[in-house]
Image (spheres, rainbow, N blue to C red):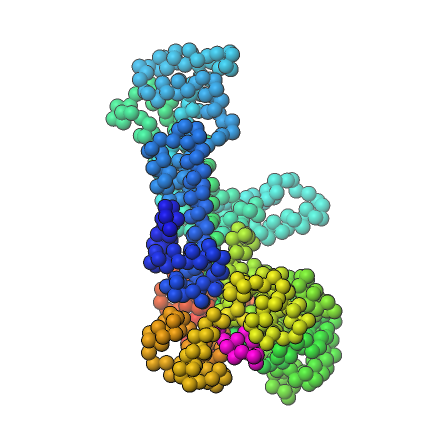
Amino acid sequence: MEGREAQIALQIAKELQVRTQQVEAAIELIDEGNTIPFIARYRKEKTGALDDAQLRTLGERLEYLRGLEERRAKVLESIAQQEKLTPELEAKILAAATLVEIEDLYRPYRPRRVTRASIARERGLAPLADYLLAQSAGSDEEIRQTAAQYVSEEKGVKSAAEALQGAQDILAEQISDNADYRTKVRDLTWKKGVLETELKPAGRETGEKKSEKAADRAAEKLAAERRDVYDNYSHFSEELRRIPTHRLLAVNRGEKEKVLTVRIQAPEAEIQGWLLTQIVKDRKAPNRAVLPYLVAVVKDSYHRLIAPAIERELRSKMTEEAEDASIVVFRQNLEQLLMQQPVAGKTVLGWDPAFRTGCKLAVVDPTGKVLDTKVIYPTAPQNRVEEAERDLHRLVEKWKVDLFSVGNGTASRESEQVITDFIRKERRPLQYVIVNEAGASVYSASKAAAEEFPEFDVGQRSAVSIARRLQEPMAELVKIDPRSIGVGQYQHDMDQKKLSAALGGVVEKCVNSVGVDLNTASYALLSYIAGISQTVAKNIVAYREEQGVFRTRKELLKVKGLGPKAYEQCAGFLRIRDGAEPLDNTGVHPESYGAVRQLLQQLGLTESSADLSKVRGRVRDIPASAAQLGIGEITLRDILTELDRPGRDPRDSMPAPLLRRDVLSMEDLRPGMKLKGTVRNIVDFGAFVDIGVHQDGLVHISKICDRFIRHPMEAVKVGDVVDVTVLSVDAAKKRIALSMIGGAAE
């Protein structure tokens, strides 16, 4: 690598705290078209074992820094074409580390729209501006007489006052365009600025007068409800540097909903005083005649040009950083949700609760195959409980149901009561789990769901999804837009392109770390495997349906659109159980099959599953064996891990779902009560825990553990089964305060 590329690699290496050679190797692999999962898993020798997270960060920074270099080159070219590129300016632009710095330096040379200053220049007032800045005038009268010389009907300057105003406009723009000045103002505003918010007066959300129309009254009611949500921000202020990300995003949403007025209160007096010192020649004895003009120039430049731009920049920077922090939380929550332990070997009854339209049921066998569907009406307004229990009994007995998987949406609480009453009457041992049904309705109405279950209606598809979420969370959740899964905060207010890319990367990481069964995986699951596009995923499924099951990984090369490069990327992440090649059911890449066979021959073992599991214990000297086999030590260690447990699932070590037999209501809760619950979502200020009462309780960050933590994720993760103590219950506002500090649940 040479020039700017080498500098990019060096900078990324410093940020990641790794060796430059590791970054250069990773960049080379990325530029060759290799995927992040493939590089992370099968090119550890080259990258020095950079993991998935490091590689994704590296990829993001590489894209940003290359974009920065591209912009830097365009700016230099533009200024050079104007014949204004001095060695000093070029050095500053080349040294600029951020896009903001480059744009600050480029500001004076950027093609402009018409401004007050540009009009003044066209009217020939630039020399008058220079005269004021020179600060040589002996009196105000001299200044006015000089300005009178620029009065010209032809140029549109009607008076000396108008000429002076034009000259001041030019100076104001010059101050605004000075990169050093803007940097200082930005720094002072950031360090000493305060964000202030106020609730807009009632009826002002839309800027229209009150109306008697029903639609307008409904809108006004909704606006009033939104105002209640933002009551804490009626007269709110906080230092810019200290605003938590969740609070900033809440303020942004309130502003977007036209409920809040938001502004940055900067240290104006200090800023304007500093700017004045930069243009006054003699600070100890300033020119008294010119000083009032310069004070006016500074004030105008700051209020009209600098402050609005700096406020936009800081608000944008703060929002971007808050979004990035929230995306990190969202990514971690999503990863933990996707990596939940599957409930294997169970026949599950999926229950999509509802009132008027009835509860939709779907019985799914241990492989995910739909056995039966039914609609029952045990909830209001029908309340046909006895009939529902008869239908449930028939389904449970006919299909030997083990578990109920119940969605946590509308009528969940009432459905849960029906289920617990039913379980008490049944002889067959039954349990139920409340699952987060976020996104189920989105999936059930999607084109993919219609293709998978053309004979089912939306409700039946949703019930199937709810059942399968318990059996195989990842395989079901990948069918849903990650933004709709409900484990983030303020996700709809973020940069959707950035959010989608980040969450898509999480799904890709999880799917590839687990691996998928080539002969049973849906095209939605296959499309997240490294190197496989949605089109190729559909072609794989079509090939499977036409030709039968895959017997070896090599057969993938017969699939339309899947060439050698795609095969290299995807093969190691696809599993074939009971195929012609035992190694195809492991994470060993086909490129290493020769080394494995050589090792087996040396150890006197065969390729049977029983013999494969013996390999690890017989390899005593890994460096020597790796050298003999012609592979790296890291690669050999990975191979031994895979052979030790063919077909292993990393999710087996994750917490199992919390199974229930009985139900509580909010009315049953009392302060001091100890319960078990499941962490459903984590946000910056705490964790939401399902304790089986339909309404999740909040464990504030201060109540998660008895040590100081900066973020809840330092102590808990989505899917954890935790012991909690009820602190308080507000039934009217549907709020439950919990604590994880104290004794275990009974």
Asked whether, in this view, residue 259 is left or right of residue 332, the answer is: right
x and y, in percent, of residue 289 in the image: 33, 18
Q: Is residue 393 above or below residue 279?
A: below
Query: For the point 64% across and 51% down, which residue is it?
Result: 221
**Residue 57 visible in the picture:** no
Magenta span: chief secondary structure: loop
Q: Is residue 14 above or below residue 637?
A: above
Asked whether, in this view, residue 430 is left or right of residue 280, the answer is: right
x and y, in percent, of residue 520 in the image: 61, 73
**Residue 372 visible in the picture:** yes
Question: Magenta stretch: residue 345 in it?
Answer: no
Q: Quadrant of residue 137?
A: top left
Q: Is residue 86 above or below residue 258?
A: above
x and y, in percent, of residue 156 in the image: 51, 15
Asked whether, in this view, residue 666 is left or right of residue 77, the answer is: right
Question: Magenta stretch: residue 578 in it?
Answer: yes
Range covered by the magenta-colored residues: 575-588
